[in-house]
Image (cartoon, rainbow, N blue to C red):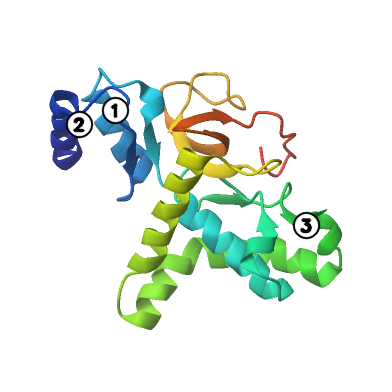
Amino acid sequence: VLIFRTMGTAIQEHVKGDCKILVVGNPAHTNALICAHYAPHLPKENFFALTRLDQNRAAGQISEHLSVSVADVRNVVIWGCHAKFPDVEHSVVRGKLLSQVMSSPEDRNWLNELFRQEMQTRGAAIVKARKASSAMSTARAIVDHIQDLHFGTRPGEFVSMGVWSDHQQYGLAGGLIYSVPVVCLGQGRWRVHSDLKLSQTSK
């Protein structure tokens, strides 16, 4: 808490009001919330928690399973915080819904069981295998997050970001930093993609 309280105070005293703050260190959502609390002159919408690493990992797992390029996998949603719930019900692969591409019982079993298990243990598995952290993957995710925020997402695409909750997003309580699907409009502007219909599993 002390580290991010100090950072929030420094942000409050030294940065411009249009500065965007991306918090990476876990628990990123809690840390971003602490920063935002101690930098009240910045709009809460300017604070983000990184969940793009989890989105990228999910897309990577799916692309490997299907033997396609990771660029072909879009609209994976990370709900909540760090890798807690990867939602692929709205994902598309080469323009088709993932549910159409992965319709066999074997594929469904992989999605419902192995995929989520691998997602929740992926970070620890990388550290164990490499004897080092996944710093490059995190750096790539930071670049992706900032690029989308600055240049905008492609038509029909949304990405996962931990953002400020204002009571209007999928029934979430207000006053939280929570990962939801986001459409980036460019030049640091964004909006929650609020049109997704959630299954009982997702809820």
Amino acid at the residue labelled 3: Leu
Give the labeled residue for mark 1: 36
Q: Which class describes the residues within 10 Å of circle 1: few (<14), some (14-19), or many (20+)? A: many
Q: First in sequence: mark 2 or mark 1? A: 2
Residue at x-position 41% and y-position 22% = 175
Residue 156 visible, this orientation: yes
The reply to whether the C-beta atoms of the residues labelled 2 and 1 are less than 8 Å apart is yes
Give SS at disc 2: helix
Residue 99: percent from left, percent from top: 81, 56
Does residue 37 appear to the left or right of 58 in the view shown? left
Along the horizontal axis of the image, is 62 left or right of 169? right
Q: Amino acid at mark 2?
A: Gly
Residue that carries the numbered disc 2 in the rendered image: 8
Left or right, 187 with reference to 117: left
Real-space CA distance between mark 3 and mark 2, rounded to the nearest whole angstrom:
40 Å
User: In what element is the residue under mark 3?
Assistant: helix
Please say whether residue 80 is visible from this viewpoint: no
Residue 10 point in image, percent of width and height: 13, 31
- The disc at residue 98 is 3
